[in-house]
Amino acid sequence: MFDELDQFFTGLEKSGRKVMVLVVPEHGGALRGDKMQVSGLRDIPSPSITNVPAAVKFFGMKAPHQGAAVEITQPSSYLAISELVVRAVDGKMFTEDNVNWSQYTSDLPQTAPVSENSNAVVIQYQNKPYVRLNGGDWVPYPQ
């Protein structure tokens, strides 16, 4: 996958087009199991499945970002990603002599972690995950 993504990015760079690429996984891989479910299962939307990295990359900018990637560490969701798109959709970022990356990534909507499927809901409360299975009581998610 990374080789194909690199090929795609190389093609975009060579094209000279002004492009914003978003990479947003549907869910994590549950590479490690925990006390509730084994590796690879996704029956319970645990934090290891639902906390996933997303990426935004720009191509064809007059002043591309220099240095290490900007990392957004506050609780975020599709709302923060959509705000990043809104901030870039006018295209001015591509033609500016200098992009203020701090301003571009500041004050994004924050979203408390909530994950849900048909049988389970997982939330963060006081920095600890809690789960409710099949409409039952909330219990701490075993760590």
Image (cartoon, rainbow, N blue to C red):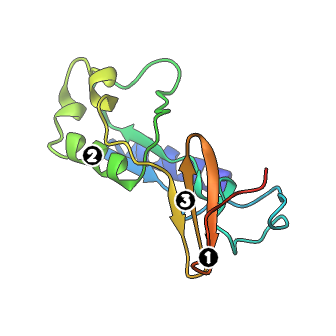
Using residue 80 as the reference point, say whether residue 124 is left or right of it. right
What residue is at 14 percent from the left and 43 percent from the top?
90
Within 10 Å of disc 3 (Cα), the crowding (few <14, some 14-19, many 20+) is: few
Disc 1 marks which residue? 136
Using residue 44 as the reference point, say whether residue 75 is left or right of it. left
Disc 2 marks which residue? 83
Residue 74: horizontal and vertical position, in percent?
A: 46, 35
In this orientation, does residue 63 appear? no
What residue is at 85 percent from the left and 67 percent from the top?
38
Residue in the foreground of this view, choosing between 134 and 116: 134
Q: Is 137 drawn above or below residue 95 in the view shown? A: below
Q: Amino acid at mark 3?
A: Pro
Badge 2 or badge 3: first in the primary sequence = 3
Residue 4: horizontal and vertical position, in percent?
A: 62, 56
- Of badges 3 and 1, the one in the foreground is 1
Q: Is 99 drawn above or below residue 51 in the view shown? A: above
Residue in the foreground of this view, choosing between 37 and 56: 37
Residue 132: horizontal and vertical position, in percent?
A: 61, 69
Within 10 Å of disc 1 (Cα), the crowding (few <14, some 14-19, many 20+) is: few
Residue 29: horizontal and vertical position, in percent?
A: 71, 61
Disc 3 marks which residue? 25
Q: Is 126 drawn above or below residue 32 in the view shown? A: above
Using residue 21 as the reference point, say whether residue 120 is left or right of it. right
Residue in the foreground of this view, choosing between 56 and 122: 122
Using residue 137 as the reference point, say whether residue 98 is left or right of it. left
Q: Secondary structure at mark 2?
A: helix
* Rendered image quadrant of residue 128: top right
What residue is at 59 percent from the left and 40 percent from the top?
127
